[in-house]
Structure formats: C-alpha cells, structure tokens
Image (tube, rainbow, N blue to C red):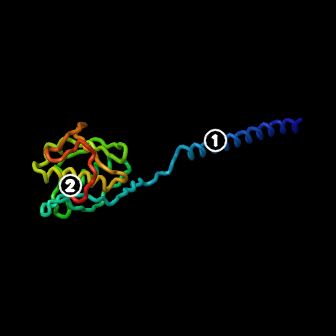
Amino acid sequence: MYVKWYWKIMNKRHNITITLIGLLLLVAIGAYVVHRLYTRPVLPPVKPVSAERIVTLYFYDPDTDTLKSEQRMVASSTDIVDTCRTIVSELERGSMTGLSRPIPPDVKVNRASWRNNGVLVIDLSDNLVKETPEGSSAEISAVYAIVDSIAKNIGGVNAVQLTVDGRSLETLETHIEIDQPIAPDYTK
C-alpha cells in the first residue's frame, strides 16, 4: 500500500514538474519570439544620395550682345517641374564667369507640362514681365536664356511655350512674340 501511495504522489509530482517545465519553456519561447518581432536593431541614419548632373545655362554677354553658355553642377531630378525650377533658379543666380544675369530675380516656375511634338509649356511668375529691363536685347536674351537652357538640358524639348501666371501673352514686352512655342536658337 505504501508503494502505491508513493507512486501516486511521485506521478503527480512528476506530472506537475513536467507541466511546469513545459509552461516555463513555452513562456521562454514566447518571450523570445515577442522580443525578436517587436525589437529592431537601431541603425544609423542613412544619408540620402544626392545625384548631381552638369547643366548648360545661357547668360548674356554685353560685349558681343549674345548669349554664352556656361556649365555647372546642379541637383538632378526626374520631375520636369523640379528640373525647370532648378534651371530658372540657376539663371537667377547669375553667371560664375562674369556674364550678365539674363532674367530678373525672383522669377519662379509655377508649372511645367508637355504638349504634343516636344513642346514644353512653362508657366512663370509675372516678375519676368514686370522686372525685365526695357529694350530688345534684354527681352530677347531673357526669353532665349530660358528657352535655350531648358531645351539644352531636358531631352525631347523641340520648343518652349512661355506663359505668365497662367496667361498666354503676345509679347514679353514689345520685341519678341511669346504667344507661340519658341524653338531654341543657340546663336542669339
């Protein structure tokens, strides 16, 4: 009788021990899984790769009364509006070689969109009209600096249509018509 009672107690203790070990093992495995799922290693911040490219810009040379090209590095973008903004912004910054800035300060690109046959429509702020100096040379160099710089640096541009604050104007001032797309002319 003592042996049966002993085996009953031992089986109960053995079952309890095995059950407790099993539960502890399950808790440990669960804690490990939760730890692996919800804790991530802290990685150092990744610096974005800034892609740059060389662009050709056109600035006014008062000695020859023509536009001269100048190259510089700018941030690269695949977005057409960003690319146009970068080019116009660089024209505003002015020449690095002493040529004259062809457009007035604070000219902004509002929008840019493609039309058929490689025509890029660029809508500019009205500073272009209000602040471009009077005279045919200033007007022609402002228009062609934009058109030539855009066409040279954006593939597929056959002509540029300029609008001002969403409006198509007949001329910038009085000397050059801008109500139609303008083909680049690198001899101006």
Examine the image and state in which quarter residue 20 appears: top right
| Mark 1 element type | helix
| Mark 2 element type | helix
Relative to residue 60, is residue 26 depicted above or below? above
Residue 39: x and y in percent read 52, 46
Q: Are marks 2 and 1 in contact (CB under 8 Å)?
A: no
Closer to the camera in the image, 146 or 79: 146
Which residue sits at x=29%, y=41%? 111
Residue 76: x and y in percent read 35, 54
**Disc 2: which residue:** 93
Residue extending farthest left: 134
Left or right: 120 in relation to 35: left
Looking at the rendered image, the quarter that the N terminus falls into is top right
**Disc 1: which residue:** 27
Amino acid at dot 1? Val
Left or right: 60 in relation to 16: left
Which residue sits at x=17%, y=55%? 101
Residue 17: x and y in percent read 73, 41
Examine the image and state in which quarter residue 97 appears: bottom left
Give the number of the mark in front: 2 or 1: 2
Looking at the rendered image, the quarter that the C terminus falls into is bottom left
Closer to the camera in the image, 188 or 94: 188
